[in-house]
Amino acid sequence: MIYLLLVSAFVSISLFEGLVLIVLLYTAYLMLKGEIRPKGILGLPLVMYSVPSFASSVAYYPGKAIERSFFLLSYFYGQRLQGRRELLLRINYTLLAFGFLLIPVLLWKHYTKGEISLLWGGPFEVSNFYSLFFLASLSLLLYKKRPVYVIPAMLFLVVVFFSQRRSTLIGLVLALFMLLWLYRHKLSKRSMLGVTFGVLSLILLLGVFFYYKDPRIRVVFEKGISLETLDEFSSKRLYNLRSGLMVIRDDFKEKNLFAILFGHGINPAERLPYPSVVGGYESVFVVSEFTERGLLGLLGVLWFMFAYFRRLLVYRLDDPLKIPFLLMLCVHLGGIVFTGFWDAMLPLYLIMFRMVEDGS
């Protein structure tokens, strides 16, 4: 099942969502039989997030209410796949293969249609997928200790740069620092300093790259810092932030208890008096989540982040094959700071993490 889920993620979002539903039903069946238990450090935070997400979305987007909430509980299926080292190796090789196979698609879309996309989605999916492929390449490099794996790692990293998704790059840099932390007992002080210098050099390179490629960054240097330039730099997130804060203010002023606890559902700006350049109030994730999923949903996200990073900080990495399984959620969480928690691929990342979270 995990292979079908993995392949479908890169081929078709509709197929992927259909398989996630099957996985969710199968997981419920296994729980009823007592073959797996609803265990895992992220389980309760996900429940706390899913309930208000469903409650606030079902009235306006009933077709997406389950997808945006209870799909994430497929996380528990990962328990079924624990303790299979050969499976980790095969999944890493599968990710490596898809990294190469999708590059012709990316190039064809770019040069024929002017798009940065793969078989589905857009630049955001490109950056996320190739971050995952990069982590898999890094995993195989450290496992096999063969320099040949540097080639796909660097190639996939270039594709992440090419996608120009700043949020994903923030998450990837965070994941690299967490990887450095996980390897702190395996590297000498000199090696740690060298790797740290490499990551900092990557951050500097990212800054230079975006300065020349992204007009949103150049405008701050050319016109100075102001509300107008900051709004342009943040892709109108400052505008969305102001609108979202006014929504929250009105909810408390009017004592709208349901909205305070459960939020206004998916794309609330379509129904509320405060406009947004997108359907939701995508800005700082605290405001984004509060307006859509309320206080309970926001607390679920914060609890999730706390539980995940606390686990990473005490995790003793005993197998480099676990790297993408552990750290793809880190890429995601680093990238949600100025967006929002939910992502179509989140069920996959959650299952992958559950496969290895108890391994040390």
Image (tube, rainbow, N blue to C red):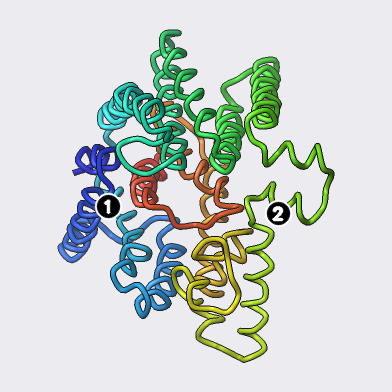
- Residue denoted by label 1: 77
Q: Position of residue 229 (x, y in %)?
A: 76, 49
Depth check, front residue: 59 or 135:
59
State whether residue 34 is above or below residue 156.
below
Real-space CA distance between mark 2 and mark 1, rounded to the nearest whole angstrom: 41 Å
Q: Position of residue 102 (x, y in %)?
A: 32, 27
State whether residue 276 is above or below residue 306.
below
Disc 2 packing (10 Å; few <14; some 14–19; many ≥20) = some
Quarter where residue 137 is shown: top left
**Of marks 2 and 1, which one's residue comes earlier in the chain?**
1
Quadrant into which the N terminus falls: top left
Give the mark count: 2
Q: Position of residue 204 (x, y in %)?
A: 71, 26
Q: Answer whether residue 27 is visible to the viewer in this image.
A: yes
Q: Nearer the viewer, mark 2 or mark 1?
A: 2
Q: Which mark is residue 109?
A: none
Instruction: Tell me the amino acid under the disc marked 1.
Output: Tyr
| Residue that sits furthest to the top in the current view | 147
Q: Position of residue 133 (x, y in %)?
A: 40, 29
Instruction: Tell me the amino acid under the disc marked 2.
Output: Asp
Q: Answer whether residue 360 is visible to the viewer in this image.
A: no
From the viewer's perspective, is 166 left or right of 354? right
Residue at 35 percent of width and 76 percent of height: 58
| Residue that sits furthest to the bottom in the current view | 254
Depth check, front residue: 183 or 159:
159
Q: Secondary structure at mark 1?
A: helix
Quarter where residue 146 is shown: top left
Quadrant into which the C terminus falls: top left
Residue at 42 percent of width and 17 percent of height: 152
Quarter where residue 177 is shown: top right
Q: Which mark is residue 231?
A: 2
